[in-house]
Image (spheres, rainbow, N blue to C red):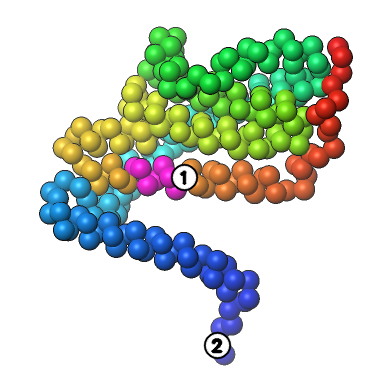
Amino acid sequence: MACEVSPGVVNKLKQAAPSLAAIAALLSAWTALVLASHSAIFPTPWQVVRGTVELAADGSLWRHIGASLFRVAVGFSLAVAFAVPLGLWMGWVRSAFATLNPIFQILRPISPIAWIPIAILWFGVGDASPIYLIFISSVFPMVVQTTVGVLPQIIVGMRIGLGVAWLVVVAAEMIALHSGLGYLIIDSRNAGNRYDLVIAGMILIGLIGLLLDGGMRLLESLESVRWRFGDPTRRADA
């Protein structure tokens, strides 16, 4: 008996069709441009796939991904543990908001990359530096979002903070470390112009970032975390 495809699967395929077509067109254009330019350095998509398989086969791919995810997990968890209670306090207590908000508004616009020299000075070139950078970069959007929302927007702030954390860990790994996807990109560039591995690292960063954001979106959609009963206009006076 022929296997029947459920309507849900058909609808998902229809929804994904435009994106898949765009990706196919992008890969075709990429291949055509590389072949037309006769580039000896810039890779074709197939060369990137082969480079990725090479990294996976020797185990280094999983080591770099694991190192990056570990740093993000630790730094982001510390930021959540600090930012959410502080943001709730600032959101409910008027005096806390009046005292602390100017400080956060001054620090928040500073680029996380600007903190790299300080991180290296304080923590050296080990895992502590990127963890600190992840913490400092993701804590501000979570504090601000939690303070403004007072419960309803905590997950939104966490989602923004996680996205920033993933960007920052890659930048930090390019400068001071010897593992992680950021290091993979720089090391591949320096070790014989392996641009197939450079592009592979960039694509992996994008795909993992997409998965992390998708996970936060799923969390945001759960009824159990849709805290919608807070009124941010009402704060305690003390």
Quarter-wise, where is residue 238 in the image? top right
Marks 2 and 1 close (CB-CB < 8 Å): no
Q: Residue at left 56%, top 35%?
A: 162
- For marks 2 and 1, the one nearer the N-term is 2
| Secondary structure mainly formed by the magenta segment | helix
User: Splitting the image into 4 quarters, where does residue 31 fall?
Assistant: bottom left
Q: CA distance from mark 2 to mark 1?
A: 37 Å
Residue 214 visible somewhere in the drawing? yes
Between residue 95 and residue 41, name the one nearer to us.
95
The residue range painted magenta reads 201-208
Q: Which residue is mark 1?
A: 208
Tag of residue 43? none
Q: Residue at x 52, y 47 (%)?
A: 211
Amino acid type of the residue that numbered disc 1 sits on in the rendered structure: Ile
Q: Residue at x 60, y 23 (%)?
A: 140
The residue carrying mark 2 is 2
Instruction: List x then y, in percent, for residue 73.
Output: 54, 32
Q: Position of residue 196 (x, y in %)?
A: 24, 47
From the top left corner, tell me how far across and down residue 125 is, in percent.
Answer: 37, 17
Vertical order, 229 against 105 (above or below): below
Element under disc 1? helix
